[in-house]
Image (spheres, rainbow, N blue to C red):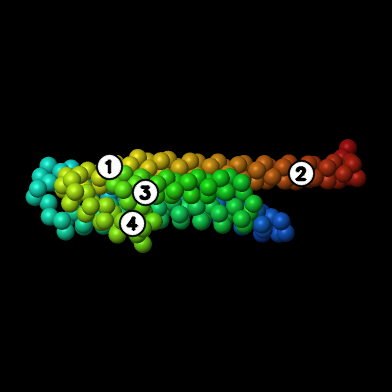
Amino acid sequence: MAKTKMAMLMAMAFAIGEAQAGGGSAGGGATEVTQILNMTQLVASYAQQVQDYQNQLQQYATMIKNLEANPLGVALPQIAQMSSNAARLLNVGQDIASSMSRVDQTFARTFQRPTAEAFATKFGLWTTASQDALKAAMLAAGLQREQFSDDTSALQSLTANLASSQGNLSALQALGSLNARQIQESMKLRDLISQQQVAQNTYLSAQAAKEQARQDAQIVRFEEYHLVEKHKADFKNPKF
């Protein structure tokens, strides 16, 4: 982690130095690297959010398991509250993925970076997959997600129907199955964010290497220039 941060700081310092020294197109390069650094910090915050999201899903799974052990002791308002919690968790994951997709789309549009566009598409597909899990659960119960204005009302209707027709255990099992699917999807989301972090760090390292090579070349030219000047001076003023 420390090496990664150092590489990013080096890339930023090199880019800023290039912008100050050269101006023109170098300024554009500095802006891009700075934007990448900003995105890296933002993605790191989303990575932490995904970790928190996974912890919440695991806690919810434990709650469902405990309730399933005594379904007759569960009141309908409690099932409705659990449905609301499940909807909230669905929205948390989708909000993270949607935000990541927007960040990548903006960067791809601004700097014409196909890699960022590809990640934007992947995060969009993840959001769709997460939404499909709820749609599948609704269809299995003979309901359509599109009939409801939001995930909360959809899930509350789903569990209410199951509780009345098949009992509380069926309603709880439906919530448990949906949550298990979201746990799997959260792992995919975590992996996707990790892949983006690797791509960003690779880009920053490449920029740092390019800048180091440019500086090394400047040093060589500087030394060659002074060596030539020294030879000229020695030729004009020979020492016997």
Q: Residue at x 27, y 42 (%)?
A: 177
Sequence-first tag of 4 and 1:
4
Residue at figure coordinates x 26%, y 56% from the top left? 157
Q: Quadrant of the C terminus?
A: top right
The residues bearing labels 2 and 1 have C-alpha atoms spaced at a distance of 67 Å
The residue at which mark 1 appears reads as 177
Disc 4 from disc 2: Cα separation: 65 Å
Instruction: Looking at the picture, tell me which residue is in the foreground, 198 or 89.
Output: 89
Determine crowd level at label 4: few under 14, some 14-19, many 20+ residues with C-alpha closer than 10 A.
many
* Front tag of 3 and 4: 3
Kind of residue at disc 1: Ser
The residue labelled by disc 3 is 135
The residue positioned 44% from the left and 46% from the top of the image is 126
Binning the other alpha carbons within 10 Å of mark 3 as few (below 14), some (14 to 19) or many (20 upward) gives some
Where residue 76 appears, x then y in whole percent? 15, 56
Q: Nearer the viewer, residue 146 or 107?
A: 146
Tell me the CA gap for discs 2 and 3.
Answer: 65 Å
Residue 38 in the figure: left or right of residue 73 = right
